[in-house]
Amino acid sequence: MAVTDLSGTSPDPAVTESRAAAEMVAELAGLDALETFPEPRPPLWLRAWSATWPKLMALAIAVLLWQCVVWSGWRPEFVLPGPATVFETLRELVGNPTLWDALGTTLLRGAWGFLLSVIIGVGIGLLVAGFPVVRTAVGSLITGLQTMPSIAWFPLAILLFKLSEAAILFVVVLGAAPSVANGLIHGIDHVPPVWKRAGRVLGARGLNAYWFVILPAAGPSFVAGLKQGWAFAWRSLMAGELIVVIANKQSIGGLLQTNRDLLDSAGLLAIMIVILVVGIIIDSLLFGTIERRLRRRWGLMAT
Amino acid sequence: MTLTETPIRAGGAAPPAVSPARVALSEVTKTFGHGASSVVALDRISLAVQPGEFVCLVGASGCGKTTLLNLVAGLEQPSNGTVTVDGRAALMFQEAALFPWLTVSRNVELALRLRGVKRAERRTRAAELLDLVQLSDFGDRQPHELSGGMRQRVALARALAQEADVLLMDEPFGALDAMTRDIMHDELERIWKQTGSTILFVTHNVREAARLADRVILLTSRPGRVAETFPVDIARPRRIEDADVTALSAAVTARLREEVARHGRH
């Protein structure tokens, strides 16, 4: 039996072979078609609606419960006003430039604080993930910082920075940076070894391995860290604005404090709704969208 | 890797000495751990793979097949002996190990990018490679949208993109269903012929080895040594159900059983 039959003694091997090849291509295409069926995605309006109605329903139930508590007469109306009064106040507030002015200040502080947290968090995260000594030194400290209530930092922050923007920023960063760092560290630690091996085999070493394999692989965990970091930043910011009131500068926290001083419960609740709504919008519209995109791209969606 | 190179179909008994071996292991020993707890994975293994040759390594668990490939790929260093590779080696795993954050086409392009291929050239080259593995229509998909067999073909395209001189394959079709595997065998054989590459293929599926290889090398387990080399003088194209393939795999299996049984006697 010859190993290869280049002389062509068998009945026209070229024809047999090309026919076999054509059959194989057809078979392969058939298998591929059977195994990849496009996942149907419902239209945008339907997706938007199915994402919205449960929220609206929950909101309606919450408002109803609130109204029931008010009706029960547990507290007098001027302490706990009903939804109708609060929504009326909110409507007035939305028409008032003071709110937008305050919201602008607060969001700007939040953005700066968060940006700084991301820079610092990523730096620390990379150091901890990359150098075992650094990990041993400060690894557990990062988680410790995360559990420290941000309000506990304010006395020190005020001593260090007086009643200033810097004091607020300081606490926001301390609140958010550990989450960002932890997200990144977790992501880098949990890169499947087979991807690292694949990267090495493809020639990604040193910085290239980080840039092309490890960092993208840490993506989902990093985004989760960012999301949590934002939540911490927003909470620290609200605490900061309640305590560190800077003269002649309106902020959301400041408005909250003013309303409390004026015993304006409806105003207080209206501002609280604003805080909640802003938090939800940024969390779900910004970070939620990034997260969902990533999950869909990676094939991690449950649907 | 030159596309015009005619693959040398060498029987294992007497490989022609016209060209130096593409891969050569000489008295290679690999030990893991130190002192009393150390494990000898490979024990004085010598083997040579000629350019264009398709060699399959078979053996039971613990024969150090994966270690051997890691040594050839340069992922690990031998404890003793020398491993020489004439050129570069690409490695393909049992898992496709595609990166989920990249599209199919980008996965292939990454291999080119890491070799310093220019962007415009990367595009066309990746398209060619996807065409070679019959996946031209799937370049823009994400890996998770593909079946296991298709992902393995992308991994093959990615390995080929490295334009390595040796293609190392670590049980690449082990996780596939029988029908897909048969087709993958045809595919691999076709691509091997077309590209003239040298392939060192590890499997525990003896039939697969008989179906694909020019030469089947049977390794013993713990420590891994070369037990026997079987030249495969069966005309191509082959089918896995061919009588000759069946006969050869029966012979290899019998020898493998002897080896495995030897371990039970201790």
Image: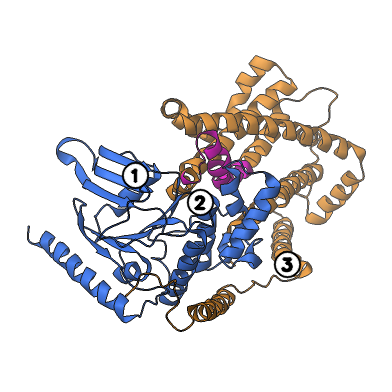
Chain colours: A orange, B blue
Q: Nearer the viewer, residue A69 or A38?
A: A38
Q: Residue flagged by tag 2: what amino acid is it?
A: Met
Residue at point 56%, 73% (across, down): A32
Residue B105 within the magenta-colored segment of the rendering? no
- Within-10-Å neighbours for mark 2: few <14, some 14–19, many 20+: some
Residue at point 86%, 39% (across, down): A99
Label 1 with label 2: CB-CB less than 8 Å: no
Q: Nearer the viewer, residue B109 or A83?
A: B109
Q: Is residue A60 visible?
A: yes
Rendered image: mark on residue B1: 2
Say which residue label 1 marks.
B71
Chain of the residue on which disc 1 is drawn:
B
Give the number of the mark in front: 1 or 3: 1
Q: Nearer the viewer, residue A113 or A135?
A: A135
Query: Relative to residue B191, is residue B1 depicted above or below?
Result: above
Task: Specify start and end residues of the magenta stretch as a single range.
Answer: A201-228
Q: What's the CA distance linking mark 1 and mark 2?
A: 21 Å
Quadrant hosting residue A227? top right
- Within-10-Å neighbours for mark 3: few <14, some 14–19, many 20+: few
Say which residue label 3 marks.
A47
Give the number of the mark in front: 3 or 2: 2
* Position in image of residue B101 (x %, y %): 60, 52
Q: What's the CA distance linking mark 1 and mark 3?
A: 52 Å
